[in-house]
Amino acid sequence: MQIQKVSEMLVTKPLGITDQPDFVNGAMKGLTPHSRNELNQQLKVIEDRLGRDRSRAKFGPREIDLDIVVWNGEIVDADYFSRDFLKSVVDQVM
């Protein structure tokens, strides 16, 4: 992966389960020879290596959460439209 741009980190309050520490959010723009599916699988491997516990509640605390939000200029994660913090960090790298 060739990293082209990285956003500032943004600290936000948790959604859903609010009795947990704040989250740190950021975004990066990069080029990859991989398909979207291949990249997504690689992101899951990275999460696992960093100790992501997938048995926890969906909106609960997590060590790391890596998502593809934009692919080839197209928004592919609907959360972009409903979470201001996500739009904020993604727009920094677009």
Image: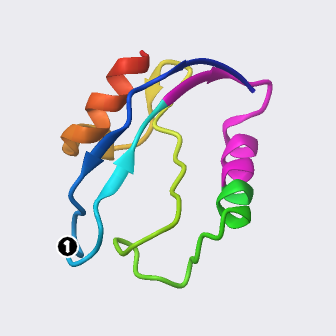
Quadrant where the N terminus is found in the figure: top right
Relative side of 33 to 52, left or right: right
- The foreground one among 74 and 25 is 25
Q: Which residue is mark 1?
A: 18
Q: What residue type is disc 1 on?
A: Thr
Position in image of residue 5 (x %, y %): 53, 17
Position in image of residue 27 (x %, y %): 46, 33
Please tell me which residue is depicted at 40% across the width and 81% down the height of the picture. Answer: 57
Position in image of residue 82 (x %, y %): 20, 45
Is residue 38 shown above or below 64?
above
Please tell me which residue is depicted at 24% across the width and 51% down the height of the picture. Answer: 12
Q: Residue furthest right?
A: 33
Residue 63 lies in the magenta-colored region: no
Is residue 23 shown above or below 27?
below
The stretch of residues the image draws in magenta is: 28-43
Relative side of 76 to 11, left or right: right
Position in image of residue 39 (x %, y %): 71, 41
> Please, what secondary structure does the residue beneath circle 1 have?
loop
Q: Residue furthest bottom?
A: 55
Relative side of 94 to 2, left or right: left
Please tell me which residue is depicted at 80% across the width and 24% down the height of the picture. Answer: 33
